[in-house]
Image (cartoon, rainbow, N blue to C red):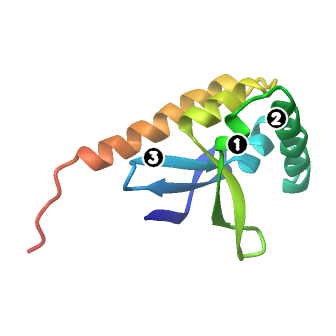
Amino acid sequence: MKDMNSFQLFENQPIRTAWDAENEEWYFSIVDVVRVLTEQPDTDGARNYWKVLKNRLKKEGSQLVTNCNQLKLLSQDGKRRFTDVADTEQLLRIIQSIPSPKAEPFKLWLAQVGRERENRSSRPRMPHN
């Protein structure tokens, strides 16, 4: 089951996320990541950037775009909408395709998000009295 109500903050910018407990994997909204890395003022600009990048990657024969999933995440209008998402490995490959000075800090942030989840999962649970 995926938890699709969460988000993580990167430099005070929300990135919509979903945790797949069964596979122990984070999924990140690609449009949110593109918005942050390209410093787009709004989601529409990020959506257009992702559309162009996705087409370029497809033309190059990349299987990355084919392997990306879509999940229903909460959108700005408060409704759940299908959104392109990527797991950590896929996201790292997408980040390589985006020239951005924020790419390296974002990669470090991704590692931190993963460690925090791992630490939470490995902590012993206290019994309820």
12 to the left or right of 115: right
The vertical placement of 67 against 42, above or below, is: above
Label 3, label 1: how many angstroms apart (C-alpha)?
18 Å
Instruction: Please name the residue shown 82% across and 23% down the image.
Output: 99
Q: Residue furthest front?
A: 61
14 to the left or right of 47: left
Amino acid on which disc 2 is placed: Lys
**In the image, residue 33 lies at what x, y percent?**
71, 43
Q: Earlier in the sequence, mark 3 or mark 1?
A: 3
Q: Residues within 10 Å of mark 3 (few under 14, many from 20)?
A: some
The residue carrying mark 2 is 58
Amino acid on which disc 3 is placed: Glu
Q: Earlier in the sequence, mark 2 or mark 1?
A: 2
Label 2, label 1: how many angstroms apart (C-alpha)?
8 Å
Instruction: Please name the residue shown 39% across and 42% down the image.
Output: 116
**In the image, residue 105 lies at what x, y percent?**
63, 27
Nearer the observer: mark 3 or 2; the answer is: 2
Mark 3: which secondary structure?
strand
- Please report contact status of discs 2 and 1: CB closer than 8 Å, yes or no: yes
Which label sits on residue 25? 3
**In the image, residue 23 lies at what x, y percent?**
39, 49
Instruction: Please name the residue shown 71% across and 76% down the image.
Output: 79
Q: Earlier in the sequence, mark 3 or mark 2?
A: 3
Amino acid on which disc 1 is placed: Thr
